[in-house]
Amino acid sequence: MLAYAISAGLVLSVGGLDRGAPLLIWLNPLGKVLVYSLIWPVAATAWPPKAPTGAPTPQK
């Protein structure tokens, strides 16, 4: 996420979309990596895995 934020900030700081086009090309695959890396944590939070059957319960 940090690399994405830095790249997006650089697009704005170089003086517009024309000069920042190479960075915009870099943001496309970087955005895919960002989305793919967030799928598992979000899914695991929304639908937590169930404990295996027959597993001992934790002692207090």
Image (tube, helix red, strand yellow):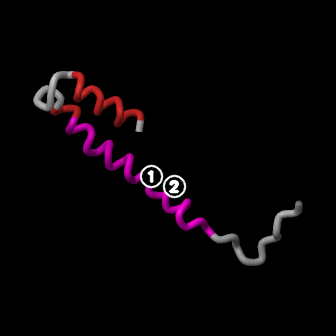
Residue 19 magenta: no
Q: Main secondary structure of the magenta part?
A: helix
Q: Which residue is mark 1?
A: 38
Residue that lies at the very extreme toward the bottom in this rendered image: 53
Residue 3 at x, y = what percent?
37, 33
Q: Residue at x 32, y 45 (%)?
A: 31
Q: Residue at x 23, y 32 (%)?
A: 23
- Three-letter amino acid code of the residue under disc 2: Pro
Quick one: label 1, few (<14), some, or many (20+) residues within 10 Å? Answer: few
Among the 4 quarters of the image, the one containing residue 53: bottom right
Q: Is residue 28 left or right of residue 17?
A: right
Q: Are marks 1 and 2 in contact (CB under 8 Å)?
A: yes
Quadrant in the picture for the C terminus: bottom right
Q: Is residue 27 left or right of residue 39?
A: left
Quick one: label 2, few (<14), some, or many (20+) residues within 10 Å? Answer: few
Residue that lies at the very extreme toward the top in this rendered image: 14
Q: Which residues are magenta?
A: 24-49
